[in-house]
Image (cartoon, helix red, strand yellow):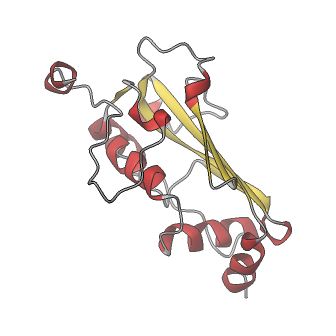
Amino acid sequence: LRRLAAAGSLCGVVRHHDSSPPMPELFLLPIHLDPDATRAGLQAVLSPDPACCNACATFLTLTQQRLLPPPLSAFLARAGVDPDKPMEVWGAPDQGFLAGWWVMVGDLGDIPPTDPRLVVTFDDAVTCILSDQVSMAPPPSLTDQPLLQLEFSWTSPTLKGIESRAWS
């Protein structure tokens, strides 16, 4: 792992303190990430407009109140992704569902794209899937880069309360 880090690849390895919960296997896989290229490529990407719709407003409330699962937030930071800047957010949070995805520069390395470890669920509510297939065209600043997509779906009745506060 030290060799990968020294070679410029940032592995999905997370060091955690004894009091921290164990990290999901997805975030421990030796995937290749380039956080500097990601930050540079996403610099012009805007956060969703909270006035756009209830999904955007709810999503921003989740990120700004730090309600994303901590291992997910830590992984996004390690990858150079601002959690407030997904490529897409959609859903019906007033019905308990929200989804979206972030893009980052990197590749899966030797991990096959069908590896079940590329999927993780937090508290039976938030499911994340890491893929080397991007759903929509990336920003022009990233079109010539190898990309990964981290998709999330959040299904929970608590989203209804968050949505009512965010969209009021």
Q: Quadrant of the N terminus?
A: top left
Eyeballing the image, is 51 above or below 127?
Answer: below
Report the residue at 67% width, 81% height from top. Answer: 166
> Considering depth in this image, is 89 or 28 the residue closer to the camera?
28
> Considering depth in this image, is 43 or 11 the residue closer to the camera?
11
Instruction: Report which quarter residue 35 is drawn in.
Output: top left
Eyeballing the image, is 99 above or below 36?
Answer: below
Report the residue at 36% width, 34% height from top. Answer: 12
Q: Is residue 155 left or right of residue 81?
A: right
Residue 61 at what x, y percent from top left?
Answer: 58, 74
Report the residue at 28% width, 54% height from top. Answer: 18
Eyeballing the image, is 140 above or below 100?
Answer: above
Residue 130 visible, this angle: no
Report the residue at 20% width, 25% height from top. Answer: 8
Residue 155 at what x, y percent from top left?
Answer: 76, 57
For this orientation, the residue located farthest to the bottom is 168
How many labels were placed on the picture?
A: 0
For this orientation, the residue located farthest to the right is 95
Residue 60 at what x, y percent from top left?
Answer: 57, 69
Q: Quadrant of the C terminus?
A: bottom right
> Considering depth in this image, is 85 or 153 the residue closer to the camera?
153
Q: Is residue 158 left or right of residue 121?
A: right
Q: Is residue 122 left or right of residue 22?
A: right
Residue 167 visible, this angle: yes
Instruction: Report which quarter residue 160 is drawn in.
Output: bottom right
Eyeballing the image, is 109 above or below 123?
Answer: above
